[in-house]
């Protein structure tokens, strides 16, 4: 499913409901005004999860509740005329051995007694999601594991994309398209209410129809009172941690709760246009440097516009980061929080473990004289420290706090926080979640971010990294098209490098070494025009291609320190390289030709094992012969190495002395050692051959063993064994 169908919702809404569907919470409640898109939201998210993550692990049942005083009555969405009694349905689900999610739409038709009856059926394998227009205060029970999600209107920075999506649907049906200007004005008047976009009534008229009459401030007070009641009921479950509930319980537009309503407005880092020209350039400069774009075209453009002061700024931070000058004083315009960040970055680059621990503790625990202007910066720095320490759960908690306190922030702020959530998902290896975030961001970020905003490149980078790690290289055309929608003129060379590297890895996964070589040549040609840290990736690309082509001549790849690279970016690259190594951890021999292949290519080859006479997988200890089927190979190391030597090169002949000396690394004594080798070969032949000498034969003239030329074979060897086996082959070939 295209993630654009979810783009009209806040991501914290998507993430919250997705967490419920994938988690173990037994009871969920989705609240929102009538016609705001609750049912459509659940349907689209359900389709997405079924395609991307659930994969048959959860059975989903969707019912629409009918008003009934006694029995629990409902009907299926597509058959409104046929009523169903829910109690027998629940009983069947409880008695089954599968996991179920029951979605009950129009739950406002349920009485308190009926809700309590449903609660009795919610065991571990049966969970319930209620969709309702009202708060259902009777739903909250301090002893029930439950979750509440508020659904708000279309965020203002996503409304253009929402209208475009509607027009695509209307065009496909041959219906009249909406006017962009009039539709945007309508959404503005109805506060993003999706259902009212097609209604001939204002938002005020809509509120009156709901019985909310009076002045606007009275209506707001009414809404706030209802929200407060809901909030108080929730506190029964978690009185010690009320702030954890705020972000999901307060709908957009209601009053703030912790006195920090001005934080988002004062936080200028993602709201460049609100600054004076000089401060704007400094903020953009810091962004470029922090994201490893010091030598980008954006950086050069800012240098020209700001001149000497800009150079002072950049010289200060780069000198400090590289550790060249420990006594340098930063530009006085740099806020206090940036000084702390630069101290953190400096010790990261110096690889001073003691200082890293000390500065990290200072960031996490000590109090500083920060104003609210820098609250978000401090929290983001704490998240970075927690990621460095691999304390991902705590990092997510800090990010959730940021989201809760900046719920009404502008699009740039929301995009920035989502990028952090995307990075966290990447570090946790939650590929499906990270891809969903990338899809979501690309759907609206181009309308929110300027062409010079480094977040464009961050989205591009992580999208490509995760696609490669998840082996979903078939999505690269779609990925490329979406990224081209961004105006990437400010990142011309960075864009070429990111796309080139991703295409290189994709070609490696597919086993297309010629195409990979072409991409590597492009990377090498532009590496001097991008950030120096990318030279490291070019080096890794060369290593990986060599490993694929000739696994025998490659040593282990060392992760060297990267100078002048932001810690979070360095860590993401390091993690990515480590995961790629796990993708290319098997060496394969097909009829005498040895290559390293990706896991995707290995699965493809393994599916054809019936086409080979012999299929030996030393990684899984699976051995297969065409006639016998799965067969056992002598567990002795000697027998395994003899077989590998014989298949190393098609048609090559080996003496008993070569086999013995290669395996044991000892001088051969024919009287003592010949019987040992002959017995090992005989035992191996007995297990593999239904006919005498079908695969392994001995020469009549020279007494050397060889694998028959007509034998078709596939051998899989883990890369942990490659170095040892190569030394064995070297000893074998040293004996003439």
Image (spheres, rainbow, N blue to C red):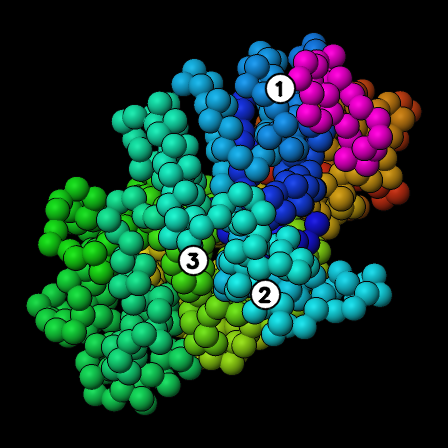
- Camera-side residue of 202 and 312: 202
Mark nearer the viewer, 3 or 2: 2
Determine which of the numbered discs, if any, sits on residue 345 in the image. none
Residue 157: % across, % down: 50, 64
Quick check: 87 left or right of 368? Answer: right
- Say which residue appears at 12% left-offset and 73% top-offset: 332
Please say if 338 is above or below 94.
below
In the rendered structure, which disc, 1 or 2, sits on the residue that comes first in sequence? 1
State if disc 2 and disc 3 touch (CB < 8 Å): no
Decide which of tag 3 and tag 1 comes sooner along the chain: 1
At horizontal 41% and vertical 42% (from top left) the residue drawn is 222
Please say whether residue 447 is one of the residues in the magenta stretch.
no
The kind of secondary structure element at disc 2 is helix
Spot occupied by residue 581 in the image (x, y as percentages of width and height): 53, 48
Give whichever of discs 3 and 2 has the lower sequence position: 2
Marks 1/2: CA–CA distance: 41 Å
In depth, the one of 415 and 570 nearer the eye is 415
Looking at the image, which residue is at 20% across and 84% down?
Answer: 309
Q: CA distance from mark 3 to mark 2?
A: 23 Å
Q: Is residue 461 visible?
A: no
Q: Which residue is mark 1?
A: 126
Q: Residues within 10 Å of mark 2 (few under 14, many from 20)?
A: many
Q: Which residues are magenta?
A: 66-89
**Observer-nearest of 222 and 377:** 222
Judged left or right of residue 478, residue 705 is: right
Residue found at x 50% / y 23%: 139
């Amino acid at each position: 499913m295209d993630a654009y169908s979810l783009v009209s919702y806040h991501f914290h809404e998507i993430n919250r409901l997705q967490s419920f569907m994938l988690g173990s919470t037994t009871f969920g409640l989705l609240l929102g005004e009538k016609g705001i898109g609750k049912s459509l939201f659940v349907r689209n998210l359900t389709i997405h999860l079924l395609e991307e993550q659930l994969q048959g692990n959860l059975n989903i049942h969707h019912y629409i509740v009918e008003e009934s005083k006694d029995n629990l009555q409902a009907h299926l969405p597509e058959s409104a005329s046929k009523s169903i009694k829910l109690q027998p349905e629940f009983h069947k689900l409880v008695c089954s051995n599968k996991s179920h999610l029951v979605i009950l739409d129009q739950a406002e038709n349920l009485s308190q007694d009926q809700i309590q009856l449903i609660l009795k059926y919610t065991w571990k394998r049966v969970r319930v999601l209620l969709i309702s227009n009202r708060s259902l205060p009777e739903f909250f029970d301090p002893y029930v594991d439950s979750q509440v999600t508020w659904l708000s209107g279309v965020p203002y920075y996503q409304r253009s994309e929402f209208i475009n999506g509607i027009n695509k649907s209307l065009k496909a049906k041959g219906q009249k398209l909406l006017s962009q200007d009039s539709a945007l004005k309508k959404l503005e008047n109805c506060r993003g209410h999706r259902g009212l976009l097609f209604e001939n009534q204002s938002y005020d008229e809509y509120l009156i129809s709901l019985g909310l009459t009076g002045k606007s401030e009275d209506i707001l007070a009414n809404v706030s009172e209802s929200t407060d009641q809901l909030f108080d009921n929730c506190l029964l479950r978690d009185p010690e941690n009320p702030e954890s509930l705020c972000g999901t319980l307060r709908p957009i537009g209601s009053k703030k709760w912790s006195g920090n309503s001005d934080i988002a407005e004062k936080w200028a880092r993602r709201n460049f246009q609100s600054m004076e020209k000089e401060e704007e350039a400094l903020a953009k400069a810091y962004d470029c440097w922090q994201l490893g774009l010091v030598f980008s075209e954006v950086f050069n453009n800012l240098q020209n516009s700001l001149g000497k002061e800009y150079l002072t700024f950049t010289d200060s931070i780069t000198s400090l980061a590289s550790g060249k000058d420990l006594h340098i004083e930063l530009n006085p315009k740099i806020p206090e929080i940036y000084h702390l960040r630069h101290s953190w970055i400096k010790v990261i680059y110096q690889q001073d473990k003691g200082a890293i621990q000390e500065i990290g503790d200072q960031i996490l625990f000590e109090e500083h004289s920060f104003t609210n202007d820098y609250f978000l910066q401090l929290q983001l720095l704490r998240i970075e420290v927690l990621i460095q320490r691999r304390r991902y759960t705590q990092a997510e908690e800090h990010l959730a706090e940021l989201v809760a306190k900046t719920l009404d922030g502008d699009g740039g702020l929301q995009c920035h926080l989502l990028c952090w959530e995307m990075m966290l998902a990447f570090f946790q290896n939650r590929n499906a979640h990270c891809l969903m975030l990338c899809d979501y961001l690309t759907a609206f970020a181009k309308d929110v971010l300027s062409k010079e905003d480094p977040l464009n490149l961050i989205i591009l980078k992580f999208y490509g990294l995760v696609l490669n790690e998840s082996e979903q290289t078939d999505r690269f055309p779609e990925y490329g098209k979406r990224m081209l929608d961004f105006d990437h003129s400010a990142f011309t060379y960075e864009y070429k490098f990111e796309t080139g590297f991703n295409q290189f890895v994709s070609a490696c996964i597919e086993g297309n070494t010629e195409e990979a070589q072409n991409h590597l040549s492009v990377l090498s040609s532009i590496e001097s025009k991008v950030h120096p840290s990318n030279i490291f990736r070019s080096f890794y690309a060369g290593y990986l291609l060599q490993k694929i082509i000739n696994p025998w001549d490659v040593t282990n790849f060392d992760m060297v320190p990267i100078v002048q690279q932001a810690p979070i970016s360095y860590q993401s690259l390091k993690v990515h390289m480590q995961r790629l190594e796990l993708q290319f951890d098997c060496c394969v021999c097909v009829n005498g030709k040895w290559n390293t292949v990706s896991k995707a290519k290995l699965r493809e080859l393994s599916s054809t094992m019936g086409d080979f006479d012999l299929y030996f997988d030393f990684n899984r200890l699976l051995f297969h012969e065409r006639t016998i089927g799965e067969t056992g190979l002598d567990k002795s190391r000697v027998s395994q190495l003899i077989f590998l030597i014989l298949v190393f090169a098609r048609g090559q002949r080996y003496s008993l002395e070569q086999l013995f000396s290669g395996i044991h690394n000892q001088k051969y004594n024919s009287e003592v050692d010949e019987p040992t080798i002959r017995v090992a070969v005989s035992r191996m032949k007995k297990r593999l051959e239904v006919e005498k000498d079908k695969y392994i034969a001995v020469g009549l003239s020279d007494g050397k063993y060889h694998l028959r030329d007509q034998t078709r074979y596939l051998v899989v060897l883990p890369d942990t064994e490659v170095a040892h086996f190569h030394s064995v082959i070297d000893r074998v070939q040293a004996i003439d």
